[in-house]
Image (tube, coloured by chain):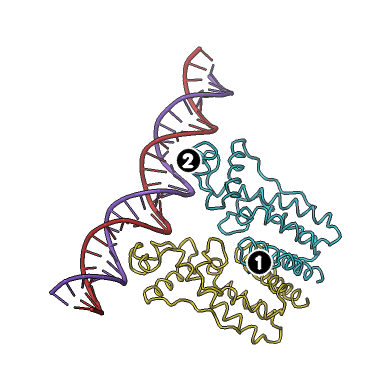
Chain colours: A yellow, B cyan, C red, D purple
Amino acid sequence: MTDAPVVVARSERASEIVATARRILEDEGREALTMRRLADEVGMRAPSLYKHFPAKRHVEAALVEDAFVEMGEVLHRAVRRPGRRGPVAAVLGRYRDLALTNPHLYRLATGPGLARDLLAPGLEEWAGEPFFLATGEPYLAQAMWAFAHGMAILEIEGRFPAGSDLERTWRSGAEAFSRS
Amino acid sequence: MTDAPVVVARSERASEIVATARRILEDEGREALTMRRLADEVGMRAPSLYKHFPAKRHVEAALVEDAFVEMGEVLHRAVRRPGRRGPVAAVLGRYRDLALTNPHLYRLATGPGLARDLLAPGLEEWAGEPFFLATGEPYLAQAMWAFAHGMAILEIEGRFPAGSDLERTWRSGAEAFSRS
DNA sequence: CTTGACCGGCTAACGGTGTTAGCCTTAGAG
DNA sequence: CTCTAAGGCTAACACCGTTAGCCGGTCAAG
């Protein structure tokens, strides 16, 4: 397992801001995360936030960096100790858990409007590496990644018909990518 | 093939507004589509738009309705005349074309913040029906849909490493879902 | 022919957003 | 002791979706 790319350190106050932002995001979603609201929760006025982050995009990028680090750690662990269902099922299972546990964070990390150029270089690739390790083949790995992301986002957005047995759909996909 | 669900008719002026909105969206993306900008392009002031649509969400919903109708038509045609690569590959190929041809519209139609309750009932399901027709099995169909959406959105957002042979990745997924 | 209603435009304005300019206090280094 | 930088603050800007209220034209009913 490659090491996680280095994420730039944050000052104490900056960490506090990021932690608060994460709480707001996870509790109430992306639209609730405004600079004024965030400042309020931290105990300052909105313009003062700019003493710590040059723009809102940078706060969001910090949140997403944390998300990718956590995701990378979990997935790398899953592929290292896959259990008896095999590495593909293990990675997919963990991926789903992560997305559904923090749906707003997942959406932020994968959705549009994110300034990906602000992320630590190589971070996203490192977090996705377990897909390659699980399949051992780059094209199938990318396809499997797309499947996982598609399932996660469709499930989060509630776009599957009510009553769908998504557990089984995930299994169906896992089999399709295991056999290939 | 089931018939496409009925989409409510639009007045002449409303059609003009929707057409203009679509042009702005496709040319410059979702953020460029503001009520003031849209009104300007149509030749009126922003508040006058509300004589034709009760809110911006309704304009977006109209755009997305059109998108789903077009997508449904294309995909149903693909599954009816699949060609020699088989129905799965045919549907996936068309799906990709549609998404990449109008990426901003695709994002709007599948992204967050869309008021899905404003869409013609059954429209989205009808547009997705070809996935079921291609696989003949509901779980695999959902998995294949997730794969297609994941690929499309990751490709649009530019999240695959530069130089990826995505053609081959699509094929890899099509094979995985054809053999099952 | 007149009257009244509605349709569809307009201006002004409200509360919200991210963000900037500029001021001021405080802590710590030289 | 003085200077500087850090980190707060208020006021304000431009833009956003949206609402209130006015007004001219069209057209049907009396």
Per the rendering, the mark at residue A150 is: 1
Place of residue B46 in the rendered image (x, y in percent of width and height, measured from the top left): 48, 41
User: Crowdedness of circle 1 by 10 Å Cα count: few (<14), some, many (20+)?
Assistant: many
Vertical position of residue A176 compared to residue D25: above or below: below
Question: Residue at 64% across / 79% down in the picture?
Answer: A130
For the N terminus of chain A, the image quarter is: bottom right
Place of residue D30 in the rendered image (x, y in percent of width and height, measured from the top left): 53, 19
User: Disc 1 on helix, strand or loop?
Assistant: helix
Question: Residue at 71% across / 83% down in the picture?
Answer: A86
Q: Please say if the residues under marks 2 and 1 sit with CB atoms less than 8 Å apart.
A: no
Place of residue B103 in the rendered image (x, y in percent of width and height, measured from the top left): 63, 55
Q: Is residue B176 left or right of residue B43?
A: right
The Cα–Cα distance between marks 2 and 1, rounded to whole angstroms, is: 38 Å
Question: Which residue is the site of mark 2?
Answer: B47
Mark 1 — on which chain does it sit? A
For the C terminus of chain A, the image quarter is: bottom right
- How many numbered marks are there? 2
Asked whether the residues under marks 2 and 1 belong to the same chain, the reply is no
Vertical position of residue B104 compared to residue B136: above or below: above
Place of residue B19 in the rendered image (x, y in percent of width and height, measured from the top left): 62, 42
The amino acid sitting under disc 1 is: Gly
User: Crowdedness of circle 2 by 10 Å Cα count: few (<14), some, many (20+)?
Assistant: few
Mark 2 — on which chain does it sit? B
